[in-house]
Amino acid sequence: MIVRQATAADLPALVPLFDRYRQFYDQPADPPRAQAFLAERFLRGDSVVLMALDGAEAIGFTQLYPSFSSIRTAPLIILNDLYVDPSARRAGAGQALVEAATAHAKAQGAAGLILSTATTNTPAQALYERLGWVRETGFYEYALTLA
């Protein structure tokens, strides 16, 4: 297995994974929407997608967005998406993707990485905690849906 930064040329391999990731979070299957969203990210250069490959087969990805902490007066990286195909889970792809994201953040001079995950996603929580991530207890997360 290798992890590398994806490019727009990887869209055919990434779209099915990204669409299944959205379905995991209760969104309807919509490959054209997944493709359009990822294509726009590549076109604008406003995210970094890392993908895990087993041979030539894409088995997982993580999408990273740049952000900033005003309190820390430093850049941060948002690990916004992490998905590994069910057939490839427990083989180390998730860990490899998180470690690659950490290396990317360090290379960018980020002060840290942040993420949120579903309270029911205990496998991901166990992975993050095993890799040294600390669950936030001092802040609440809020969302305002506009569309």
Image (cartoon, rainbow, N blue to C red):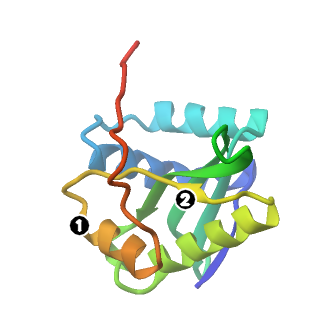
Disc 1 residue crowd, few under 14, some 14–19, many 20+, Cα 10 Å: few
Q: Is residue 127 above or below residue 90?
A: above
Residue beneath label 2, please?
62
Q: Residue at position x 45%, y 84% from top?
A: 92
- The quadrant of the picture occupied by the C terminus is top left
The residue labelled by disc 1 is 122
The residue shown at (77%, 40%) is 45
User: Residue 86 at what x, y percent from top left?
Assistant: 31, 70
Q: Could you tell me if residue 57 is visible in this image? A: no
Relative image position of residue 122 (x, y in whole percent): 23, 66
Relative to 118, residue 104 above or below: below
The image quarter in which residue 85 lies? bottom left
User: Taking 17 as reference, is 140 left or right?
Assistant: left
| Residue 21 in view of the camera | yes
Circle number at residue 69: none
The front one of 36 and 90 is 90
Q: Nearer the viewer, mark 1 or mark 2?
A: 1
